[in-house]
């Protein structure tokens, strides 16, 4: 039987570097809720102290997330709870997913706040296409599993986004070159912090740069998608052959022109006229 929950679970993004990158609404919610469920209470305490917020905190992290659920649902029975992670949006490569999923299934009201996220911030600054993208999160650490994950994304034409730690960046760039080719990349490092840096260029250039200057700090790698499959150009001989074949097997000129123009990337009228000439010859 579903329990009645008085409280709302707020999903509250926090800054990914610059303490000013938090919304007025997020600060109000953090002040007003009965409890804040935080990935690391010490990290969140620094943020709360900065904004003079004294709401009670409880930890909710990778290793206690299942046992902590009941504490959080008990709190939701009588009041609001805010979920925060160490940085950015909870649930994105951070704990939160299980709590949110469970809260939905128990009928708790969920209110997500828009806010900081490293992947989207890096993407928009990368200069790579933003109209479609695939978030890969952290790729596997083991060489073989990572190569397989990249190979699975090799045909993806949308921009790819991966989180990576600085000590694995050059390995990742090598794996990208091996699995995807020398694609354009943007390495976004320390976004919104003092040493913010965007390296835009070919994966091989990024590899050379970061081999020479081992990176520090936090990193998002944006990778250009696969180039669209090469279109094989049909010349007049190809179109003529296709027309002869279709007309010879009884297809109407109208239907043949429609099908062949779509396949050849030709104007339909031009195919039709060529078909007329073939028919007249015959
Ligand atoms: N929940 C966070 C979000 O919404 O972006 C992501 C948390 S995940 C545990 C941490 C990873 O995010 C880092 O290893 C790095 O890949 C990326 N990241 C976080 N802050 C960043 C920053 N300021 N600059 C670049 N990457 C960052």
Image (cartoon, grey):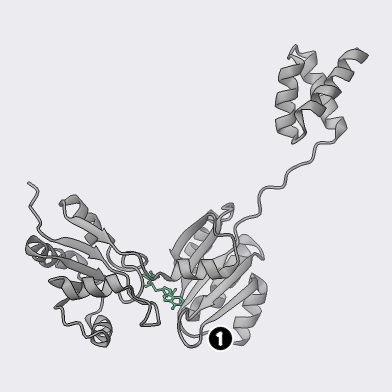
Which quadrant of the picture is home to ligand 1?
Answer: bottom left
State the residue at coordinates (28%, 71%).
Answer: 26
Left or right, residue 264 beside residue 27: right
State the residue at coordinates (64%, 64%).
Answer: 183
Q: Nearer the viewer, residue 140 or 188?
A: 188
**Residue neighbourhood size for the residue with mark 1, other residues' Cα within 10 Å, grouped as few (<14), some (14–19), many (≥20):** few
Q: Position of residue 106 (x, y in %)?
A: 15, 52
Q: Position of residue 125 (x, y in %)?
A: 55, 70
Q: Is residue 142 visible?
A: no
Q: Is residue 28 visible?
A: yes
Left or right, residue 183 beside residue 191: right
Q: Position of residue 243 (x, y in %)?
A: 80, 22
Q: Is residue 2 above or below residue 216?
A: above
Residue labelled with disc 1: 214
Does mark 1's beta carbon lie closer than 8 Å to ligand 1? no
Q: Position of residue 145 (x, y in %)?
A: 47, 62
Left or right, residue 214 beside residue 53: right
Left or right, residue 101 beside residue 271: left
């Amino acid at each position: 039987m579903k329990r009645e929950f008085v409280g709302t679970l707020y999903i509250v993004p926090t800054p990914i570097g610059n303490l000013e990158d938090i919304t007025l609404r997020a600060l109000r919610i953090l002040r007003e809720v009965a409890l804040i469920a935080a990935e690391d209470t010490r990290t969140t305490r620094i943020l709360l102290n900065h904004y003079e917020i004294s709401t009670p905190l409880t930890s909710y992290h990778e290793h206690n997330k299942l046992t902590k659920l009941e504490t959080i649902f008990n709190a939701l029975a009588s009041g609001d709870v805010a979920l925060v992670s160490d940085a950015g949006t909870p649930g994105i490569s951070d704990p939160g997913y299980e709590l949110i999923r469970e809260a939905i299934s128990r009928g708790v009201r969920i209110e997500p706040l828009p806010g900081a996220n490293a992947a989207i911030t890096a993407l928009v600054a990368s200069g790579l296409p933003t109209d479609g993208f695939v978030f890969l999160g952290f790729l596997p650490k083991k060489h073989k599993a990572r190569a397989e994950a990249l190979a699975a994304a090799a045909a993806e034409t949308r921009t790819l986004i991966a989180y990576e730690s600085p000590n694995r960046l050059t390995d990742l760039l090598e794996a990208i070159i091996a699995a995807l080719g020398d694609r354009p990349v943007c390495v976004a490092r320390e976004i919104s912090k003092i040493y913010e840096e965007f390296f835009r260029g070919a994966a091989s250039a990024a590899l050379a740069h970061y081999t020479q200057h081992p990176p520090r700090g936090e990193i998002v790698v944006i990778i250009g998608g696969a180039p669209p499959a090469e279109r094989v150009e049909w010349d007049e001989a190809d179109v003529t052959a296709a027309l002869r074949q279709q007309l010879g097997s009884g297809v109407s000129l109208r239907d043949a022109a429609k099908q062949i123009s779509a396949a050849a990337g030709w104007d339909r009228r031009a195919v039709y006229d060529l078909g007329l000439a073939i028919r007249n010859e015959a």
